[in-house]
């Protein structure tokens, strides 16, 4: 795997855990895109590895865990290329592969499932749309503002200092996220593998109906939702 030339923030990841389960099950976990890093999913990855013996990979996508400027210049194709490399890597190690992700990572999970034969997927707060007027103003705001502040101090406080991420995120990522969400929606009927979906009741960033929309449109016969 190629490494970014930029210095990675301490604790940002990536994280790779070897497993010892007999069926050699591997889980590829994809972090969200709100300025955070692999640190968001590290506790869950450690639990799955320790309690079930799964091989768990939590890759750090291009543009994350380095600088906000790096994220601003990162393309959708760069994210996809990195994810396919990670998927190929874990397939080489494991007989069964499950992919899961949080927020934008959930969108990527569904895109991968729509284009690949996977043994299962799970998403946490994967959006079908973003709330508020801000996303609608991006085409105008981007000419005046390049970045939007992130409440990093509050996030660190809420996670007892475990959150690792940026103090600001580029405005232009919203348009990239919208493109990916639209791509995901088209692929939902093509997904056939078992799936489980989670969404926090207090999540105010994504559309409240996101999980239900995905659940109803996905082609999987074995599916569950919680939230």
Image (cartoon, rainbow, N blue to C red):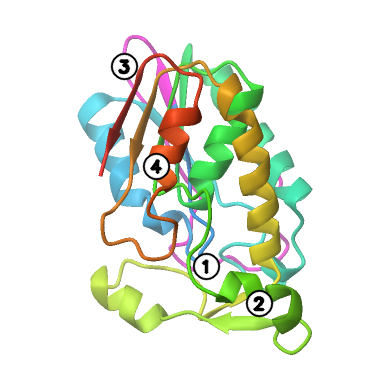
Taking the spot 52% from the left edge, 19% from the top edge, the residue there is 93
Q: Nearer the viewer, residue 62 or 193?
A: 193
Residue 24, above or below 80: above
Give coordinates of residue 145: x percent, y percent: 70, 87
Residue at image x 40%, y 48%? 209
Assess disc 2: are there few (<14), some (14-19) or many (≥20) residues with their C-alpha within 10 Å of its C-alpha: few
- Of pointers 2 and 4, the one earlier in the residue sequence: 2
Which residue corresponds to mark 2?
137
Q: Gap between marks 1 and 2, in whole Å?
A: 20 Å
Q: Is residue 15 magenta?
A: yes
Is residue 147 within the magenta segment? no
Q: Residue furthest bottom?
A: 144
Q: SS for tag 4? A: helix
Q: Residues within 10 Å of mark 1 (few under 14, many from 20)?
A: many
- Residue 204 sits above or below residue 153 on the image: above
| Residue 120 position in % (x across, y down) | 43, 21
Decide which of tag 4 and tag 1 comes sooner along the chain: 1
Q: Which residue is mark 3?
A: 21
- Residue where numbered disc 1 is placed: 35
* Gap between marks 3 and 2 measured at Cα: 49 Å
Residue in the foreground of this view, choosing between 157 and 225? 225
In this view, the mark in front (3 or 2): 2
Tell me, yes or no, if residue 100 can be seen here. Answer: no
* 207 sits left or right of 162 in the view: right
Total marks shown come to: 4
**3 and 4 marks in contact (CB < 8 Å):** no
**Residue 25 sits in quarter:** top left
Disc 4 vs disc 1: which is toward the camera?
A: 4
Residue hosting label 4: 211
Give the residues in magenta: 1-26
Which of disc 2 and disc 1 is earlier in sequence? 1
């Amino acid at each position: 795997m190629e490494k970014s030339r930029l210095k990675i923030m301490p604790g940002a990841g990536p994280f790779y855990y070897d497993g010892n389960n007999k069926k050699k099950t591997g889980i590829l976990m994809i972090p969200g895109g709100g300025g955070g890093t692999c640190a968001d999913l590290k506790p869950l990855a450690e639990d799955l590895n320790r309690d079930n013996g799964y091989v768990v990979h939590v890759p750090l996508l291009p543009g994350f865990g380095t600088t906000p400027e790096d994220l601003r210049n990162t393309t959708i194709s760069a994210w996809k290329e990195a994810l396919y490399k990670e998927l190929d890597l874990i397939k080489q190690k494991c007989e069964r592969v499950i992919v899961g992700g949080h927020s934008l990572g959930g969108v990527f999970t569904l895109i991968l499932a729509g284009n690949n034969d996977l043994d299962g997927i799970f998403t946490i707060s994967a959006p079908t749309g973003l709330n508020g007027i801000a996303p609608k103003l991006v085409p105008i705001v981007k000419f005046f503002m390049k970045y939007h502040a992130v409440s990093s101090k509050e996030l660190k406080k809420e996670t007892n200092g475990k959150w690792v991420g940026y103090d600001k995120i580029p405005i232009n990522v919203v348009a990239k996220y919208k493109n990916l969400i639209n791509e995901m929606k088209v692929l939902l009927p093509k997904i056939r593998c078992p799936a489980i979906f989670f969404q926090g009741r207090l999540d105010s960033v994504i559309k409240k109906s996101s999980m239900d929309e995905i659940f109803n449109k996905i082609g999987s016969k074995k599916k569950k939702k919680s939230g």
